[in-house]
Amino acid sequence: MLQAAYYGHHKCCSQYITNIIKEICATLNLSWELEDHAVELPKRFYLEDNQFKESFLICWNSDYLLVRSLECLGFHVIRDPRDIITSGYFSHLYKHGEKWPKMRVYRNYLQGLDKEEGILAEMEFSSVYLYHIFSWKYNNPNVLEKKFEDLIANPMEEFTEIFSHLQIVPNLLCKEDLRAIIDKYSFKRLSDGRTQGEENVYSHYRNGITGDWKNHFSEQHIERFKKLFNPILIKTGYETDENW
């Protein structure tokens, strides 16, 4: 039966978190299933008596329409929407989604733009992912809310709280084993030895820092972002008012 779920969004550390979940499931002999862009789960997730086949559900690009139908414990991770745009721009320009036909078309389009125009285009392209963050209901007692920035700054502390909420630590997994898994998937290991801040635009793990939008947003980008997405920043607590 379904014991736990992770709800993620585009460019919110989903691959990193998924690696850790898969490692924990392998350690504990738990089954897992990954679903992308789900509003409801397909029949393959269920047994004949409508019980889940898997123990851990991993949801990428999550829509709250899916979450409200589930009663299991879960956690949800968001990121500063401005960093989502910045990360998305570089990822879509160089690396992300080689097998995604829409991305091949979009990448060709991005590569024909300069950076100023490209980041503006990214705001339009990623608006659907930011809407999922905005439309999320942040008061579900079964779902622990977390931010990308905290996971990066204090991974052991944050993941301990997450998996304690899911009743995995210490019930099934000790902190020492959790620490070993987190260390295995540190930025330095995943980026072939780079430290956070060392950039490689061709890597999925580009630089591992937060607040990077400040290095790339022009005044035009800021004004455009405010016009389109300020309510998201306010709702998620990344800003307290519109005059940032």
Image (spheres, helix red, strand yellow):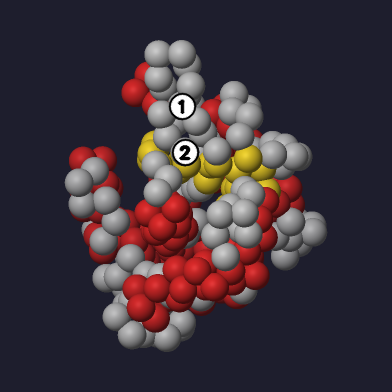
Q: Nearer the viewer, residue 133 or 47?
A: 47
Q: Nearer the viewer, residue 105 or 172?
A: 172
| Residue shown at 54% from the left, 28% from the top | 66
**Looking at the image, do the residues carrying marks 1 and 2 touch, with CB atoms under 8 Å apart?**
yes
| Residue shown at 29% from the left, 56% from the top | 96
Circle 2: residue type: Ser
- Disc 2 is placed on an element classified as loop
According to the picture, the residue beneath numbered tag 2 turns out to be: 55
- Disc 1 is placed on an element classified as loop
Real-space Cα distance between discs 1 and 2? Answer: 8 Å
Q: Is residue 21 left or right of residue 153?
A: left
| Residue shown at 64% from the left, 49% from the top | 167
In the picture, the disc for residue 52 is 1
Q: Is residue 27 left or right of residue 112?
A: right
Q: Give x and y (percent) for residue 125.
A: 41, 45
Q: Is residue 187 left or right of residue 138?
A: left
Other-residue count near label 1 (Cα within 10 Å), few / some / many at <14 / 14–19 / ≥20:
some
Q: Give x and y (percent) for residue 175.
A: 58, 69
